[in-house]
Image: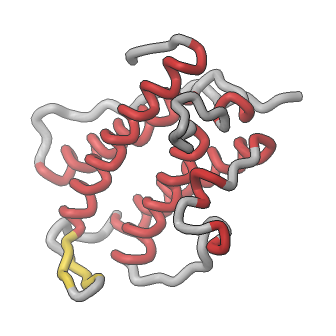
């Protein structure tokens, strides 16, 4: 049986909340929107390149965002060390280029798990908490803003890829 990306209930947040709730709410909405763009597609469809010559695929976006979540929240903010998520010998774009449609369910689950772990890491932290990366000081607030912009950019890409796959637009 072929795996199909499940339907997703998109998170909706308050439009009048305090800063913390607003940032986490928007991040949750953008996270769920990426998977909403993938819902109903098979692993083969998620791995299909539709805007040649770009290597951009929905599965690549899922894999990329799992890597980005881990990098910013668990590695940089929490200071933890992990083996690379994807094969480093394949280069920095392995998340986009080393796709296996048969592993789409695993990649989808990995992203959802990274969300959970990221949220767990920051649950007791202040937006003003900082860390140093490459000689620069960053705040948790900046990570939230960066992640919202990262998801927003890639959801735009996902819109184009999805439309080319099956004509679905919007939402």
Q: Position of residue 102 (x, y in %)?
A: 80, 43
Q: Nearer the viewer, residue 99 or 29?
A: 99
Q: Residue at x 18, y 66 (%)?
A: 127
Q: Residue furthest top?
A: 167
Q: Quarter of the image for the C terminus: give it.
A: top left
Does residue 114 appear left or right of residue 48 in this picture?
Answer: left
Q: Is residue 84 above or below residue 50?
A: below
Does residue 2 appear left or right of residue 9 in this picture?
Answer: right
Q: Nearer the viewer, residue 144 or 92?
A: 92
Q: Nearer the viewer, residue 93 or 63?
A: 93
Q: Quarter of the image for the N terminus: give it.
A: top right
Q: Nearer the viewer, residue 110 or 151?
A: 151
Q: Position of residue 38 (x, y in %)?
A: 56, 29
Q: Is residue 137 above or below residue 67?
A: below
Q: Position of residue 129 (x, y in %)?
A: 20, 76
Q: Residue at x 57, y 46 (%)?
A: 60
Q: Position of residue 5 (x, y in %)?
A: 65, 31
Q: Residue at x 58, y 56 (%)?
A: 95
Q: Is residue 159 above or below residue 88?
A: above
């Amino acid at each position: 049986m072929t795996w199909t990306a499940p339907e997703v209930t998109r998170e909706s947040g308050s439009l009048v909340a305090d800063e913390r709730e607003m940032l986490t709410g928007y991040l949750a909405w953008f996270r769920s929107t990426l998977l909403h763009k993938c819902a109903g597609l098979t692993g083969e469809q998620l791995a299909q390149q539709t805007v040649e010559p770009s290597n951009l695929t929905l599965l690549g976006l899922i894999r990329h965002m799992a890597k980005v979540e881990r990098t910013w929240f668990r590695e940089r903010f929490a200071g933890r060390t992990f083996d690379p998520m994807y094969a480093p010998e394949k280069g920095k774009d392995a998340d986009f280029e080393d796709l296996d449609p048969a592993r789409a369910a695993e990649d989808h689950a990995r992203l959802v798990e990274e969300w959970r772990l990221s949220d767990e890491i920051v649950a007791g932290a202040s937006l003003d908490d900082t860390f140093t990366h490459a000689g620069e000081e960053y705040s948790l607030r900046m990570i939230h803003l960066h992640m919202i912009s990262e998801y927003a950019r890639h959801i735009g890409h996902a819109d184009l890829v999805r439309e080319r796959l099956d004509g679905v637009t919007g939402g």
